[in-house]
Amino acid sequence: MTATNLSPSLSALLERGTITRTLGLDIQKLDKEAGTLEVHYTATNDFLNPAGQVQGGMLSAMLDDVTGILVLAMVEPEGFGSTLTLNVSFIASAKPGLLRAKAYFERQGNSVCNVRGEVWQGETLVASASAVCMIRRMR
């Protein structure tokens, strides 16, 4: 992970995450004031469908990951988020290699928040998503 402005608890949690390692997570920039997060993922040949494109489930996992990390960063240390819905649109095919994902914190209520995410390969938008997350409080 590259970003140095992550809290120690968030960094420790992400280090434990098997899915973050599988997806090749590399956090580039977290801006809590703006409510944005940019990360890089590395799509390997193991992510490909029979047509040689990154399988949609892997892109969905990246979108769930980037939006979930942003929610966690925005509501910690008091709470964390659980994804209630993730609506994904597949826009273009992706090949193995670097994928850039961005998340945007849209709105927070008492118990839910809205987040959107995008996955890019080069200058091409590959997939986008909107998510609703439940905010769970630490006890």
Image (spheres, helix red, strand yellow):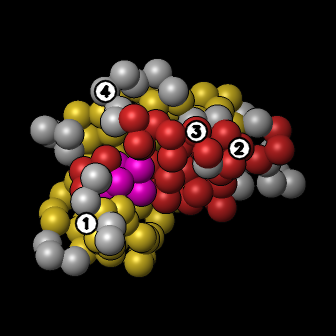
- Compare residues 45 and 5 and report the one nearer the observer: 5
Name the residue carrying label 1.
114
Helix, strand or loop for disc 3: helix
Main secondary structure along the magenta-highlighted residues: helix
Q: Nearer the viewer, mark 3 or mark 1?
A: 3
* Badge 2 or badge 3: first in the primary sequence: 3
Contact between labelled residues 1 and 2, with CB atoms less than 8 Å apart:
no
Quadrant in which residue 34 is drawn: top left
Q: Is residue 35 left or right of residue 19?
A: left
Name the residue carrying label 3.
15
Tag 4: residue type? Answer: Asn
| Magenta span includes 116 | no
Q: Quadrant of the C terminus?
A: bottom left
* Badge 4 or badge 2: first in the primary sequence: 4
Q: Is residue 40 above or below residue 70?
A: above
Name the residue carrying label 4.
5
Name the residue carrying label 2.
22
**Image point 61% across, 48% down: which residue?**
17
Residue 107 placement (x, y as % from top left): 15, 63
